[in-house]
Image (cartoon, helix red, strand yellow):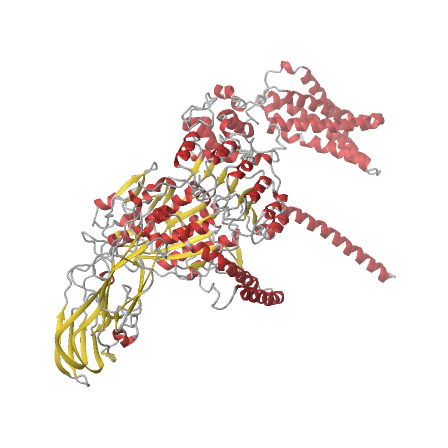
Amino acid sequence: MEKEILEHRLNINRRHFLSKLSLGIGGAALGSLLIPDLLGKGEEDALPAGISHFAPKAKRVIYLFQSGAPSQLDLFDYKPLLNKMQGENLPDSIRKGQRLTGMTASQKEFPLAGSFFKFNQYGESRAWVSELMPYTSKIVDKICFVKSMHTEAINHDPAVTFFQTGSQQPGRPSMGSWFSYGLGSENKNLPGFCVFLSRGQGNIQPLASRLWGSGFLDSIHQGVQFRSAADPVLYLQDPEGLDKISRRNMLDKIAELNNMQLQEFHDPEIATRIAQYEMAYRMQTSVPEVMDINDEPEHVFKLYGPDSMKPGTFAANCIQARRLAERGVRFVQLYHMGWDQHGSLPRDIKNLSKDTDQPSAALIMDLEQRGLLEDTLVIWGGEFGRTNYCQGKLTVDDYGRDHHPRCFTIWMAGAGVKPGFVYGETDEFGYNVVKDPVHVHDFQATVMHMLGINHEKLIYKHQGRRYRLTDVSGKVVDQLFT
Amino acid sequence: MIRLRNFLLSGTLLLNVMLLFLWIFDSKITGLPDWLKVAGRLHPMILHFPIVMLLLVALLEFLNKSEERESIIKLLLSITAFSASVAALCGFFLLYGGGYESSSDLYWHKVAGIITALLAGVLSSLRSFRVFVYKPVLLAGCILLIITGHLGSTITHGKNFITEPIARRSKKLKSLEEAVVYPDMIQSIFNEKCIGCHNPNKRKGELLLTSYAELVKGGESGAVFFAGNPDSSVLYKLLLLPADDERHMPPEGKPQADPEEIALIRWWIHTGAKKDQKYAGAAVPDSIATIVKAKFDAGSPLDQLKIAFADQTTIQSLTTTDRGVRQLSIEKPYINVFMANRKSIGAKELEELEPLKNQITSLDLSYSKLTNEQFKQIARFPHLTKLFLENSNFNDTVLSTLSALQYLEYLNVSNTKVSDAIFATSDKIRSLKKLFVYGNNITTASIDAYRKRVPAMVVGFTPDLSTDTLYRGRLTGPVITIDSNVFLHNATVEMTYRIRGVDLRYTLDGSDPDSASLLYKEPFEISENKLLKVRAMRSGWESSNIQAFSFVKADHSFATVSLDSMADKRYQGRLDTTLIDLRRGSLEQGDGNYLGFEGNDLGASLTLAIPTTLSRISVSYLVRHSSYLMAPASFEAWVTDENGKIIRPLGKLVITENKLKENASKEEAVLKFPAQSMQYIKIRVTNRGKLPAWHPAKGAKSWLFVDEIVI
């Protein structure tokens, strides 16, 4: 009997304990409603696929990447003081002991080199553009210059990697992959992220395919490189002797096998593989159709210039970019290589400007007249700037410029970007930013904002750490929007 | 205990009498000694005692029936009575200490407060002697208490203090076009953030912010703003003071003006602080426009319909490979449907979207093969703001469907079959802002007329580039593939141009090709020494620059070759055989047809299969000064015996270069000599060694790139 009483008491105690406990937990739970982040992020970040955080201004991006880093001082950032002080040494008060590359760090003198090219103001916005860019100067009222870009990297590969992935070290997903991940692809017959390369006459810096890789994201988000050759996407066409039906049957069987594996191992890469096979099958017809530019009217080739009829040029790639944008591709990335003008800049920059000036301007005009510019964001720019002093010996008819991460100019146009606007300022020497600096992460945050994504919320958890394109920084530059 | 109660009840009596007295004669009170003003300021603290006590009494009285409560209730009642009287008296002192202007709220607060205090005073005795009226009076006291408290809070914190967080923060304006800056924006900020104190009741600083007229009157320190000069206007300056500054407005603890509101007030004063300025006509900088849009814009007419969000599972179930259905953002319910570039879609795909017809605002049917009958399904979606029909078969027969879309702002019918009739339709769609008719069969004249008639419309159309000299380009040359331009029998030439409609004209006689020259149709062969000249032609374009290729028929070929020293490891071509494989390199040094030497010479021994009579030997090489690729300094050849011992020299050619060349070129050095028989030959091609003085990188090692030795 005594034992039963004891047990009874114990039961009561336990019951009491539990009921009190449930009250306590209930209270804590109520309290936690006020602090949503306290007990982990939960489902907050898991937006239904493809929904933006807020109304997007842009549906898609065409990024005209100028690989090798164009000289802002010879194209857009007009610094007459450099011409006045031609040959004089860069004052220490301006350089402030900042690091230089190994290529000029040992130089005893840093002779200032003014641009050999004439600058003029254009449009209602009175933006400065050099004579190297006659076509761009006609569209200044449609574009927005950011003259106060700055980056952390000082050499090509880390700098391009930084621009594309938000980190100087390889391994993170490219910008286009993040968008494909965050927003999905509109056209299921084409990849959401397409890449084109072209080469100018000049010092070419190699580009690795990891620059458009998906890093730790699902590989379905990686950029697909389109080539100018007869087979634009490699390994896409059926081998000779294999007909469509056999291919279909084969794919169905492979999918069946892959599905079995997927059921067993639940490896998302298997699902990706199944999807990729299907996408490739559809691309067998969609790619040749989009790549054949024979249906373009005469005035389009006139607009983009004669190079546009030559496959593999920047101009031809610009037309391709527009064709893909029209068909709902989210992110088209062009790279034009050859801007790395350490020496013979006056000669080489003419070639590179000629390659890119007309087609870039044409792309803006073409998108505009077709009603595409208002939801397409076009970006033109390199990975860093070039120095205001001469690399090597400054002569009467030649100069070169070294890498300069402290300031450079890019331009943007389209979807929600304030047209005819110049943002940011550099000092009279074109060496440091003096007003409204825009860091690469700020730039990325801004581009993401235009696509309706909060850069702090597009997150992927990998190996125990949460990753974003903008890493741990980045500030949206509101002033760039209309 | 009982003593305490008696003491409290007697105190209550005293105070209540005093209260009644003051109430009756309150019009006679003109001022208060300072120590009573201090007592008055204790009112906000003391008033909480009677509130709690009275409610506690009610709680015990109605819910607890145990015997133990008796003494507690009695004690509580006496404390209630006493504290209520003290609170009411202090309220009196606060009121007459100054700072409050009479208002109905204030009056009723006073009356209700006094009656509550008096009721509390009699409750104790009622409980003992008039039990049947005690409970109703207690209940009435509680109700009165709540009313008094609420009126008091209204006086202190302003109207709608309690519901403010859930009430809409700012009144949104139906149309920014018609908004007037002062009443619709500035006054609404005052209403939200200032009039809690600057109202006729409280008149803090003798300033009223309830209307423009009052604002102009200013406060105790005079005018609060100077039109056009915000920085000397108190109205603006006090907002900017740090929060812990005594003069900072709104005071600590009150809802603060946010930076956007401060910016708006500054802008309003800056632009003249006018009363009737319309927003539409004002000089609005971008920063202000952004603020106004966020704060006051009720959104598009569509936003004002307050369309409900669609169910995500419905959206998911309607998403297929051919039909992308996507809610554009989590903020708004609007859905974009993407069916562009789909050959297979038909009316069914549109019909199925019926459940989402209210949310779909953007529909992309471009590059589809829909018939015009099927296009009529568009009418299902009344809230479309963007419609993409470009590059489809869309024609005039469907235009009447479009005029029903009264929210449509963007219409793209580029590259379709519509005619000028589109302009009449666009007149009917009053919301339309952008119209794209690029690539349609519409005359320039009618486009111009329309643009003149509706200047606000953004119209996209085919540009006329014919008059612009910037757009007269020179064609690029074709891609020319030649299997070998040094050959023993024949060479094959193939030309390609990516775009149809470009003529490739060529000559083989050295003359420049023109429109009458040979037209390239298919690959052809060349079997003797020839000079091929090609140019691409297309009407409306400048013909391409002439591309020239020389074809050399080699009389003999070498059997073997061996190099004295290896080429640079990056440029080894096909090793030794590179020199005698009858393949010429292109202008690209890395194409695998070259041997490259950095600073070194090329020496080689060559063998013919049988003794042969020769009169010439040549070496061809690539020059690209920008990449340090120079012509050789000299080219020498000797006849040797089979062991490589020199028998006699064949000659030496010295090559000079004295000017920087911008472009790369293929060149050849030919050594001629009297015809003679030979089988073993030794050659030496001398590298210049260092870049000459006229080269920008003078002194650096020069490169030698050789591809072929021809006899």
Residue B175 x %, y %: 52, 29
Front residue of B395 and A97: B395
Nearer to us in this view, B384 or B225:
B384
Q: Is residue A234 left or right of residue A18?
A: left
Observer able to see residue A77:
no
Quarter holding the N terminus of chain A?
bottom right
* Residue ranking furthest to the right: A1
Would residue B599 be visible to someone looking at this image?
yes
Q: In this image, B507 relative to A40: left or right?
A: left
Does residue B95 appear left or right of residue B247 in this picture? right
The residue shown at (85%, 26%) is B132
Q: Residue B580: give x, y in percent of width and height.
A: 25, 75
Q: Does residue A398 lie above or below B148 as drawn?
A: below
Total labels drawn: 0
* Residue B573 found in image quarter: bottom left
In this rendering, is residue B54 above or below B388? above
Q: Position of residue A120 (x, y in %)?
A: 27, 41
Q: Quadrant of the C terminus of chain A?
A: top left
Q: Quadrant of residue B11?
A: top right
Name above or below for residue B416 compared with residue B674: above
Which one is nearer the viewer's eye here, B454 or B121? B454
Give the x, y percent position of residue A17. Answer: 75, 54
- Which one is in front, B65 or B15? B65
